[in-house]
Structures are given as C-alpha cells and as structure tokens.
Image: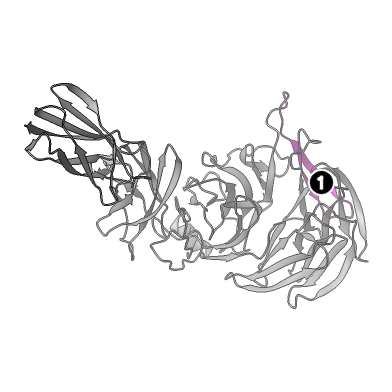
Amino acid sequence: MNTVRGTRHTARLAATLLAAALAAGGLTVVAAPAAHAAASDLVAKLPISSFSALTVDSAHQRVYVADSNLGHYDNKGLVAVYDFSGERVTTITTTRHVSGLALNSDGSVLHVGGRDGILRYDTTTYLPLSAAVAGTDTCGRSMAFAGGRAYHTAPYANSMSDCDTTLTYLDYSQTDNTWQRSGWQDHGRLQLEAGPGDRLMMGQPANAKAADPFLAVFDAGGTTLVRTADRRFADAEGKGAANLKDMAFSADGTKVAVADAAAGTRLLDSGDLSDAATGYPALPSGASASAVAFSGDGKYLARGASATGATPDLLLSPADPADATPALEFAFEGSLDGDRVAPRGLEWSADGSRLFAVTTNTAGSQYWLHVVQPPAVQYDTRFAQGPTHSPARAVAGEALAVRGRLELDGPAPAELLKVTATRTDAGGTHELGTATVKADGTFTVLDEPELIGDATYTVSFLGDLTHRPATDLTHTVSVGRAASSIALSAPAEVPMDTGVHLTGTFAAQGRALPERAVLKVERTDRLGTGTLSSVTVAADGTFTVDDLPRARRNTTYTVSWPGDDLHEGSTASATVRVTR
C-alpha cells in the first residue's frame, strides 16, 4: 500500500486480518516503500472544500464523491468521479449545490441531490438524463435507492443556522419524474441508507429538537413505505442517547452497525434494532466514531473515527463480532493524508477487495480519497527498553542525542525504516522529524533542547506494509543551563604608580547571548573590597581591565558574570603583588 507522508504521522497499521481470510476475499497487496507506513494503496487529493456523500459503482468500477458547497443558493455543485485505482475520470458540475448520491440497482444511473431537484446521470457517458422534480433543498439532502425508487430527504430552512433542527421530509421520485411525500418526517439532517431485501434505514442525528434521536428500518418493497423497526437509545433518565454519525446494513441485511460518536460502534439486529448478542470491541481510547461500512462479500467491517496523533482513525476487522482476529488499524495525520475519517466517508467495493475512505483535515476544509487494500500479514514491533542520551548532562541550546533500538519480528524490511520523534517541554510539543533505523535496529534522534527543565522525548514507529506499530517510547531528560567561563590573565607584580592591566576571555556555551556580556569587576586589598567599573566583552570574547592600585602588597581582582535564564554564571580571580 503506497502512502508517503511528509509530516510526523504516517498511516498507522496496528494489527492484521487473517491471511487466509484476506486471500479468500481477493485482497491484494501492492508493494510500498518500507520506509513509510502504508495507510492505503493509493491516495487522491479531492478537489472539494466540503463533503456530503460517497458512493461506489462496482459494476463500472467508479467512485463518486459529492461536494455539498452549501452556504449560498447560487453556489455551483461538483461530483468528482474516480476509478478504482484512484485516478480521476471526470468531474460533474452543476449550476446549484449538490448533496446526496445514490445509484440504481444495476449502477446505470447516478442520482444526485440538487438544490431544486434530483439530477440524474448516465454512468457510462456521465451525460445528464432527465431530472426529477423535488422540494427546494437549502441544507443538503441524503439519498438512497431502495425498492426500485430513489428516496431523498427534503429539508428547508431560511438560514443555514436552522438546518440542524429544521423539519425534514422523506420523499421519493416517481416514474413521471415528479416527487411524492412518503409521510415520514422529523427534525434535523435525517440520514438514509439502503440495504438488501428492499430495506431502507433512516437515522436522526442529535439536535436541539431531538433529545433522544431515533433510528428506523423500513420495508421499501411495496407501494407504501412500511416501518418494520425503530429505536431510541436514551434510558429513563435521558442518558445514553445516540449521537449518530453513520449507519450501515450488513451484507445479508440481518444486522445494522451504527457509528455513534457517544457510544462507539453499536451492532443491532435489523429486525427489531435490539442490541446484538455479541458486539464489536470498543474503539481505541481517544477515538470518536465517524463512519461505518460492511464489505459487500459479508466478511469485513470498516470503522472510521476522528482521532489525533497515533490513535487509529480507521479499523478493519472481521464482520463476525465473534471472530477475535485483531483489527487492522490506520492512523491518519498530515497534509498528505488528512487527519481523520469524515462522517459517512466509508464505502466498499462489492467484492470486498477495496475500501474507499474519505478523510479530512481538522478544519474540515480539505479532503482525500484513500483506496485501501490491506496487506495479508503483519508482524509485531517493539522498542527495546533502556533508551539513553548523550551527553549525560543536557543543557539548553546544545546538541543532544537520544538513542534507542527498534525490534522487529518477521522478515527484515527491504529498506531502512524511520521513526518519528517529538520533544515536550514547558514551551509545548515540538516536532523533531524522522530518524533512520539502522539494520541492527538502532536509531539516534538529534535535538537542541531550548528550555531548562524536564524535556520528554516521544519516539513513534507507525508501522509499514508488513510491520505493526510499536508502543511509543518515552524518555525524559533534565535540561540544565549551559556553562559559561572566564579566563583572566594578570602580571605577577607591578609598581603602584604604573597601574594594573589585566586581560581575559569570556565564553558561553549553548545558545548565543542576545547581547554582549557585561562583567562585574571587584578589587580586594588590605583596605577592603570595592567594586570597579564593569567591562563589556568584545565580539571576539576578549576584555581588559585597567586599574590604579590604592595600596601596596597583594591585590586580588575578581571578574564575574551572573548568568541568565539559559546560562550559568562564572567567575575568575587573579592576584597581583603591588610594590612601591
């Protein structure tokens, strides 16, 4: 799988599906540079700034991604079309914004939710067909094709700020290109999902007018849409309400998986929406569910999430929750991959050989399409205990090396791997880039700590095509102030009336001083101690002290610098015998 990421976190692969199961599902492995963890075989940067829908046409091997482009009634719409290798085939543009997508049963017609109607396109030529009338949409539609009909939601609001709570109708297109109300409606941005056996599912995202949002399953096979199951999830105290982000039918239609940002992944029996006897493991700590999809061959479940750092954003596991095979995990973080899986951003090809994932950045303003083909097998990795650093006394502004060793099971990588590192100190967390792992597993992270106090170094290995990630390595170093020094030269003896001329040099290690050092000068003789005029160190580090002694015998001159926030102080003394 071929993803190259230039920022700290390349895609993380944390566990494996069974090789035999993957082989049976037709999953293939594409060679990737071992120096980079592979989140997917291919990644395409999407030409969109917002995202509303993803659908896959397995008959023609096409992937459709819609840019909702809401915000103004005159905004143009865009549907980007890709093949299964991640190459853009064409772009469909519309005079008004678009939202939901749905394919008819044989994949010959693409239905697109437009502002003023349901647009339709031939999936071979991409030419427009006759459009279907629909109620004006200002908030974005959801669409699904079930029972031979294209269903769509019809929300309307005077302001975008009202879209989350506006009354939304469930409508469908008729053969004469008009539309008909199904009779079902509720508040908010209702979401639709089609399933096998003429099933249709409608879910209600959380909103201010839905303290306990619903999920409902319908039979769309007849002339009337019949609800067969429904559920709200809050208990008698109002706790446990769903925060719906996505939903999906299993390949046989008997199960429903729900991506619930509050509860993780819910697995339900589609007949009555009760909890399945066995559910899926919880998402990793720090991951919030955003998407879910079953593969068409019934073997795999993909779960998308919003997470930061090395916490997985995507997990692929057996669809059977009783199968304890560890999930294959991916983490997205960076300008080449996005930071998280977008809500409703997962779809499989019908044969289960490819997963298509839409990721977005934290701001939700950029999007990527990943074509995922999991590897057949991965091996464990770990950091050996006992990282070291040198020099033993770390100081601010001087080079520091943190050394460790990465242990790999399985075959040696074809190319040298890399680890990524950060330093966390009183000033926050700082990216340190990558360090190469040598053939014997050793690596060295180079840094110049900037502040005194504890600096914690975190080293991560995010995996490659055949190796799982390692648990992060942390190492805390106490950083002190850099040393300074003063060297002072003086004559052994001078006549009293001649005066004393001293020379010296000053040096400060670590970070350069913002200004030239000013040195304090003291004179101690038999009459006591007094302070002389300070001297400023020259650009080359030298300085001179001139004095006319006031008493005979031994006179000691002491030159000192108090130090600063990043440097220790220093002092030097010289004694001169003063004669007549």
Q: Which residues are magenta?
A: 213-236
Q: Is residue 189 visible in the rendered structure shown here? A: yes
Work out whether 236 lies above or below 211: above
Where is residue 178 drawn, in percent x and y?
93, 62
In this rendering, the count of numbered labels is 1
Residue at point 54% right, 58% down?
Answer: 335
Q: Is residue 222 magenta?
A: yes
Residue at point 60% right, 61% down?
Answer: 368
Of residues 382 and 386, the one nearer the viewer is 386
Of residues 483 and 543, the one nearer the viewer is 543
Where is residue 416 drawn, in percent x and y?
32, 62
Q: Which residue is mark 1?
A: 163
Residue at point 43% right, 36% down?
Answer: 426
Of residues 83 and 297, the one nearer the viewer is 83
SS of the residue under disc 1: loop
Residue at point 72% right, 62% down?
Answer: 66
Work out whether 476 lies above or below 238: below
Q: Tell which residue pokes out farthest to the bottom in this image.
A: 125
Where is residue 547 drawn, in percent x and y?
19, 36
Q: Is residue 339 magenta?
A: no
The image quarter in which residue 54 lies:
bottom right
Please state, as top left, top right, bottom left or bottom right, where the C terminus lies in the image. Answer: top left
The image quarter in which residue 32 lies:
bottom left
Of residues 441 and 282, the one nearer the viewer is 441
Question: Looking at the picture, which amino acid does disc 1 mark?
Answer: Cys
Q: Is residue 254 visible in the rendered structure shown here? A: no
* Left or right, 276 with reference to 498: right
